Structures are given as C-alpha cells and as structure tokens.
Image: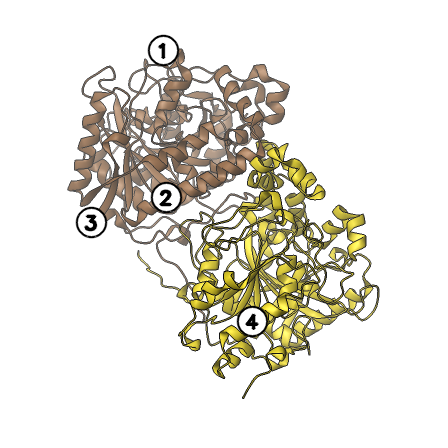
Chain colours: A brown, B yellow
Amino acid sequence: MPLNLEDLSFDLASLRAAYAAGTPVRAVIAEAMRRCASDAPHAFIHRLTDAEIEPYLAHLDGVDTASLPLYGVPFAIKDNIDLAHIPTTAGCPEYAYTPTQSAFLVQQLIAAGAVPLGKANLDQFATGLNGTRSPYGACRNAFNPDFVSGGSSSGSAVSVAKGWVSFSLGTDTAGSGRVPASFNNLIGLKPSLGLLSATGVVPACRSVDTVSIFALTAADAQAVLAVAAVPDEADAFSRAAKPFGVDFSAGPFRFGVPRPQDLNFFGNDAAIGLFAQSIERLHALGGTAVEIDLTPFLDAARLLYEGPWVAERYVAIQDFIEAQPEAVFPPVRTIIQGGKTKTAAEAFAASYKLKAFKRVCDAVWQDVDCLLTPTAGTIYRIVDMQADPIRLNSNLGHYTNFMNLLDYAAVAVPAGFQGSGDAQGLPWGVTLAAPAFKDVPLLRLADRFHRAQALSLGATSATLADTPAINTAELPKGSNTAGTVKVAVCG
Amino acid sequence: MPLNLEDLSFDLASLRAAYAAGTPVRAVIAEAMRRCASDAPHAFIHRLTDAEIEPYLAHLDGVDTASLPLYGVPFAIKDNIDLAHIPTTAGCPEYAYTPTQSAFLVQQLIAAGAVPLGKANLDQFATGLNGTRSPYGACRNAFNPDFVSGGSSSGSAVSVAKGWVSFSLGTDTAGSGRVPASFNNLIGLKPSLGLLSATGVVPACRSVDTVSIFALTAADAQAVLAVAAVPDEADAFSRAAKPFGVDFSAGPFRFGVPRPQDLNFFGNDAAIGLFAQSIERLHALGGTAVEIDLTPFLDAARLLYEGPWVAERYVAIQDFIEAQPEAVFPPVRTIIQGGKTKTAAEAFAASYKLKAFKRVCDAVWQDVDCLLTPTAGTIYRIVDMQADPIRLNSNLGHYTNFMNLLDYAAVAVPAGFQGSGDAQGLPWGVTLAAPAFKDVPLLRLADRFHRAQALSLGATSATLADTPAINTAELPKGSNTAGTVKVAVCG
C-alpha cells in the first residue's frame, strides 16, 4: 500500500507503520526536509543540508527498520545543544562554536536511529519564556503567527507542532520546555534533573537546567526518554533514574490544585474555564482534587529570578559577555549582567531559604500524588511582548519557575483551545508535576488526560485518536527507569 | 558495695554499674562538678551552678535508673550550641545571647537522662582547628598544657579526656570534631550531615556543618548518637538516617590508604610509624589495604578555605561582625571578613567544581569500604601556633577538610602515643571514613581498632579493656539507623 508521504503524520506510530510497510527512510527524511524548508515561523537557526544529513542516513543503510527504537525518526535540536560539525550558536552568532562531537544524549538518539534535521531557534542563551529574544527572528506560534511561540525552546516546539519533525530537544530551567509546549498543543516533558546528560549543552543555570523533550504524544515522549536517559560519567549533575514507586496514573489518585487566590490567568478569561474543565477531566479519570497553598512554591520561584541563581547564567558565558557585551541581545544582556553583582553571601543565604521552602513544599506529597496547574496562565501577541519584555515574560513563568529549584518532574499536556478572547483558537495547556523520578507515572497520566480530549496533534491535521495510547506494559528501556529495584538488606 | 566516687570512670558502662549498685545520681553529678571545677586547661566558658543544674536532677527524681538510656550521664556542650537559660557565646562575649530553650538535640539528650554541666570553650565562631582562638583562653591539651587541645571543639574534647564528663557535643565543619579527639585520645564521631539537628546551633558554614560527639569509647559515642539522631522538621538540613547497607566492620573489608606522596606528617616522624602500625592493625582485623589517590579529596578540601564557602561564615554573623568588627578575635575576623567579597559567580563555579571532585572521589567506594587516614599529621605547641596561626592551623586540616564537603561520615579513633620527638607522650589518632549514613559500621570498626590496643580512656587512668565492646547486636535506637529498609516495589 503506497503511502502518500505528504499526508504522513510524523508521530512515532505512524512512522513505524510507514517503515514497516516498506517506505524508504530516505523518502521520509526528504519529505521532512521539504516540510522544514517552509520555515515561516523562524523555527530554525540552521537546517541541515543533504550532505550534512547523509552520515545519519548512511548509518541506517541495510538496517532492519524494527531493530532500532527511533529508526528514521526526524528530530530537531535546540541550538544550545551540540550536533557534531554544525555550529552551536545558543541564539548568538558571535558566540557560535562548531563542536567536533554531538552532545552525549544526541549521540544516544542518533545511535537509536533518529535523524537530526536542524538546530532550532531559541531565546538567546535560553534566557526567556516567550520566543522573541533571538537575533534569528522572533519565533512565531504554530497556530497564529501574531502570537509568541513560547520559549526559550521556541523553534523546538514549533518544528514539532508543525509536523516537520517527530520530536525535538529543548532545555528547561524555569519553564522553557513547558511553556512552548502549552502554546503549540504539544506534550512537553521536563524530566527529573540529571536524567538527561548535559554534556555538550550550553548551560543556563547549570544547577537547575535539564534537557527537555517535545513530542506530539506522551507515548512518543516516553519512547524518546527511554533512549536518551543514559547516565553520563562526564556530567557531574547526571543522575541515574530511581524507582518511581507507586504508579498512581491508573487511579484512584489525589491531585493538588492551587487555591483560587493562588491562580493567576493574567486577564485571560477563556483559560479560567479550560482549567476548570481540566480539573473535571482528572476527576473523571479517577482523581480527587485537593486544594493546596501555592505560596511556598511561588516564594521559591521568586528566588530564581530575584535571587542569586542568575549568577549561574553569568558564569556560563562570563568570558564572552565580558569580551563582547554588545553581542548579547539587550533584554538578555540586562538579565545576565545582573548576575555579576550578586555576592556569595547572597547565594548561600538564598540556598538556605530554598532548603526551607522545599521542606514546606515537599510536605504536599504526603497529601497528593501529583499537582495540576496551568502551564502558563495566558499567551501574548509578539508585538505586546516586545513592548513589555520583562514583565510579560515573567507572567509566563508563574507556574513553571519553581519546578527545577524544587527538584520535581513535570509534563506539560494540551488542555484544549481558547474559545473566546484575544487568543481565540490558540491552544492552552496544563502541567502535571510530581517529585523527581516520577517521570513515568506522570507521562502515563498525561497520556490519559490527553486522550480524554478529541485533539489534533500539534498544529497538524492528524488526530490523537489515531495514535496508540502509551504502553504501560512496556517500561522505558533500561532498568533504570523501571519501577523495580534490587535491594541488598543487611543487618 | 560502696564505690569510691573519686575513682569512678565516667564511661557509660561504669556509670550504669554505679547507678545499678545504688549510687545516687546527685552524688555522681556532685563529683563531676568537683572535677569540672579543676579547669586549668580553660575547657569551660561557663560551668553550671548548683541552681542551674537542679532542674535536670529534679527530672531524674524517682526515675528508675535503667529506664533512661543516659540516666545521670554528665555531659558538656560546645558553647555554640544552646542550653536553655545559659548564655551562648560562640566564644565571643559581645555576641552572647541567652536562649529560652535548648537546642533540639540537647533536648533529646536531657530527655534521655543526660545532665549538662557546662558550656565548653571553642575557637571563636567555630573558626579554627587548634583551640587557641578564644578570648576565654587558649584551651590546653589534656595531656600536656604546652600543646594545643585541637579545635574548634577544644573544651568539649578536653572535658571528656580529663574524665570530668562522660561525653560532649562539638561541631564539625572542617575537622573540629575530629582533630581535638585525636589530640586528646578520644573517639570523635563526625556523623553524616543532617543526622543531628542544627536547630539551636550557631552556624559556621551551614551547608557543611554538623554537630559532633566526643566520647571515651565507640560504644559510648554510639549510645549518644542513638539518642540524639532525631529528624527535626524545623531544620531544613536535617536528614533521616538511611540504611547503612553492608556492615563491613566485622571483616573481611577493604580500606583505602593514601599513596605515600599524598601523606604529610609535617615533620612529625613519630607519626609515620604510628600510621604504619594503624595499617597493620586494620590488616590484622580482616582488612585489605588499597592504595588510593588522595588528590581529588585534597582538591575538594582546598575549595573550603580558598573558595566561597567562607561566605557562609560571614552570612552566619553578618549583622554582628558589621556592627562590632573589633569584638571578633583577630585571626577569626580576618577569615570571616574574607567571605564578604566572594561573588555568587564564584560560589556557583566552586559548587560545580565540588560536584566534579565528588564524582571522582565517590568512585573510590567501588574499591573500598572505608578510608584510613591520619586525623592530623602532627600537633603543635601553643606558643608555636600563636606565632604562625593561619599556616599551622591549615596543616591540621589536611585530612579533615574535605569530609563534609563530600558528604562522608567519619570517626576519629586513638592510634597510640608518640614515642619520640617534640610531642613525645602525646596521643595520635587516625580517622575512618565512609559514605554518608555508614556511621554505624564505622563506629563498630573504630571500636575493634580501638580495642586492638591497650589504651587508657582519654587522659584518665581508666583502661579501655575494662569497658565492654560495642554491642553489635543492639542497633542504635530508632529504626532509622538500622540496616534494614522497607521497600514498596511496583511495576
């Protein structure tokens, strides 16, 4: 049965079916490249040429299509993550360098058969949550080019939402892997800190950075995580996955919801209704809502931007920003240079505060299995964002900034489309969060939540219902992400 | 059988026997107070009066002596740890405040029957390893008043070594709970970080501080730890004990020994032989020596004093030292004010380095169960220390500075007496170290190592052989410090 490649959805199940039916990988990748070439939204900083892609295709020559978990799967890489022989710009042309080898986790994906197609646009040095802070062009929303894409992993999200690639890598310090997922109708997995190697990744705030995964479905995100989550001896922040414990995703489960006074939709009335529906949807899936006080979480969040962690951004590019301050995008420069004047005393004092906040926040896990929050309360037009770049950007991080500081895992999941207001027709999303290493039950619950809605995949015409649900019988590859544990018990 | 109280050793076994034989607690405490009153070495900043002790004795009235694990046990408290209604000076009279309640862990000890007799002298603000940095007098070694006691927990060690109290509380950031143990022929337990609450303790470097325990025997240290190690909700750095895993203490076990080029005895030839004997002693106990490269440990250690952690000392007393800099002892002032100028960028950069060093250091635990090092290579005369206060103090921390930064547990244990040289007749000691939460097997091995020598207890005439060995059948109180674990395994 010859496939019409132009209509092929790039979700993993559809791709696998196409390969099983005999579709040549070179034909699929050529189609993907064709789609990527229509890059009106400024999703890419660099699209790979035929010659640059050839080694990855040659790697697949003569290989049984079923033998590699990501055989012939096209993907995009945020341009603060190294791909061998392609410049890494971090969104700053003057900063660019050309690595001789790919980031450790990119190597894992390529070895599993995935094919990199491009380096994706980003808020420069991963500083921002909106997607406009790039000299390569403000990245535009996959649904409406007047609106922001979300950032900092802007191009990573848009290239998946547009159906050009199957998945993409982003990074997430304060929400950069979740806000763009929400704005483009995608799954955005912000894994537990340390699960994905940071070797070959330009740091933002190194102690609270993680690589993230954008995908059309939770099943696809899980498949990518399973390949990518390999402990890395060279990365001091790398952590092997721990057992996730009780799998709450099948229900019954208890989920925390912020008190009404903790919620802020920043004037977006359409989002209020979508969040209420999301709570009802979790109820229908076997969940019991528990109202929680978000104050300590928001207090922790404030530390990230008002506190000393911004010094990590300064450390990351200290030599460069001292030598060429004018090369750094103005709002980004202002933020990063702010890190220069923080003192070690402030850093330690803030770390004590964070410890105390975490103690209070962690107590919530005695009451609930996961948290449900909006991913971002609202979305903005590009023109409005550029007119008020700091305040509006800050609004976008209201529910995301605290997650890595507190060492939680999170999955952004689509929650419908805005039926009225300025952003009518644009997607809106929620985030499910839980303690570190609960990535698997979070993805499973995200999949159930996702499938309880009749949604399209990203901004494509493919539908979620035509893809298979997450396979809960199949644990992600590697015993590290499994729910069992070997224990030696000695007296 | 009437006891001669003047001859009573205050090790716990002897005390328990005395109480079991009907000796009144008030008689024992009166004898302890009498001994404390002979404080030529400047061990105490404040000895409690009869009236101040009375409430603790009243607490024991009519109580079955066997019903409390520390019934009638006299102890001393380093004067940076709160005892209700007694000033806490931290070694600085201008800084003193009078707490209305005792430190959380002091409360545990008192509830278990222990009786506080005094607040012990210290290097001011716990800054130092030698014991001379106090306006209350340079604390003198329990064996020879011309030599330093070791610090910063100077008076805590000397009061136990002299046989005036059964045990004492110190604190240990860079060696303050171990170096004074070594210089006074004591067991010095530096527990895993977070096991002992820091509520009511004046911080030094809060992220790497721990309360420590001085005792005459390892069994006594274990008994005190069992009572004191109670998780504290109010202390964000408090951690519940984790299972210690395999108990290597009975042997066969593998122990790491620094390469010859990593060892530094700072000219003390007598110590060279004592360390060689210590290695042989562990061999005889079933250990196999494995030579290890100490370089990454020493690199981590250098971060503590040359790096930004000193900013924590500044944070701890920032308001005070800004208001009254002249009130701070000169070498201490120089050190603490050095923390003021460190930047947050330096703090984060150093934390990255430490992460990387820890990764390298931790690899040693794949080869060995524990480390054996000198506690301090040598000891100094007070007059020499005061003439060269920074460099000689730094020498004392060669083997101790890295331990808390790397999150290891350690026990300082006596290893004999120096038979020649300037410090002839003074004790010398080694430290056994292992990863966090291995306090129990470390104490058990320390006890075996200790008992393989015919030693006296501290500077008293009592002998170790007359006390019972550590009870390995009896785990410290509370399942938290036991070697078993409840595991829920879910697919």
* Foreground label between 2 and 4: 4
Callout 2, which amino acid?
Answer: Val
Nearest to N terminus: mark 2 or mark 3: 3
Residue that badge 4 annotates: B30
Mark 2 closeness class: few <14, some 14–19, many ≥20 residues within 10 Å: some
Instruction: Report the mark closest to the observer, 4 or 3.
Output: 4
Secondary structure found at label 3: loop
Crowd class of label 4 (few under 14; some 14 to 19; many from 20; radius 10 Å): few
Chain letter for mark 2, please.
A
For residue A26, above or below residue B436: above
Query: Circle 4 sits in a helix, a strand or a loop, which is it?
Result: helix
Q: Which amino acid does label 1 sit on?
A: Val
Badge 1 sits on which subunit?
A: A
Q: Which mark is residue A383?
A: 1
Mark 2 and mark 1 in contact? Answer it, CB < 8 Å: no
Residue that appears at 40% across and 27% down: A156
Whole-number angstrom distance, CA of label 1 to CA of label 3: 45 Å
Residues marked 4 and 3 touching at CB (< 8 Å) = no
Evaluate whether label 1 is on the same chain as label 3.
Answer: yes
Disc 1 vs disc 4: which is toward the camera? 4
Which mark is first along the chain, 3 or 1?
A: 3
Label 2 sits on residue = A360
Q: Which residue is the site of mark 3?
A: A252
Disc 3 is attached to a residue of which chain? A
